[in-house]
């Protein structure tokens, strides 16, 4: 069970601020209430696996990315979770460097102040 987030990827259009060094520029939008339920704050991490990547909703054009572990970092702007800098190369090396492609990720864990916890462990919550 997990938090399943899907949508078109956005891209940060300003320079990174101090504290954002671990995040790449690509992000997904998540309604803040789903982060607030676990007291996730700026800099906390979401850990999960990729369900699908494509040019539009429903497309799965990168089957080699399916089930790859990926992490995102909660941003300063509450509804944005940013791809981790560590995972950026798996997107970059496939030419996924601009906003606008579809991404679906299943987040099952979060890291808050170096402590890993399970999130949404009783049901799949699709947002």
Image: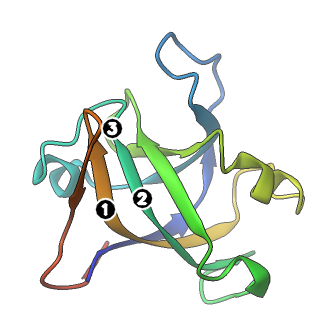
Provide the secondary structure element on which disc 1 rests: strand
Q: Are marks 2 and 1 in contact (CB under 8 Å)?
A: yes
Left or right placement of residue 47 versus residue 121 in this view: right
In this rendering, the answer to whether 48 lies above or below 124 is above
Residue 80 spot, x, y in % from top left: 42, 43
* Res. 47 mark: 2
Q: Nearer the viewer, residue 105 or 28?
A: 105
Residue 95 spot, x, y in % from top left: 89, 58
Give the residue at mark 1: 109
Instruction: Name the residue: 56% across, 60% down.
Output: 70
Q: Give the quadrant of the C terminus.
A: bottom left
Q: Earlier in the sequence, mark 2 or mark 1?
A: 2
Residue 9 spot, x, y in % from top left: 60, 57
How far apart marks 2 and 3 lie (CA) works out to 10 Å
Provide the secondary structure element on which disc 3 rests: loop
Q: Nearer the viewer, residue 100 or 60?
A: 60
């Amino acid at each position: 069970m997990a938090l399943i987030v899907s949508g078109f990827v956005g891209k940060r259009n300003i320079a990174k601020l101090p504290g954002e060094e671990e995040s790449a520029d690509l992000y997904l939008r998540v309604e803040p209430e789903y982060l607030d339920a676990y007291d996730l704050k700026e800099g906390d991490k979401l850990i999960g696996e990729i369900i699908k990547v494509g040019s539009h909703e429903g497309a799965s054009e990168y089957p080699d990315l399916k089930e790859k572990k990926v992490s995102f970092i909660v941003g300063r702007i509450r509804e944005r979770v940013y791809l981790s800098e560590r995972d950026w190369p798996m997107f970059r090396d496939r030419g996924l460097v601009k906003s606008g492609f579809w991404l679906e990720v299943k987040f099952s864990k979060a890291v808050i102040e170096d402590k890993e916890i399970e999130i949404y462990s009783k049901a799949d919550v699709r947002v």
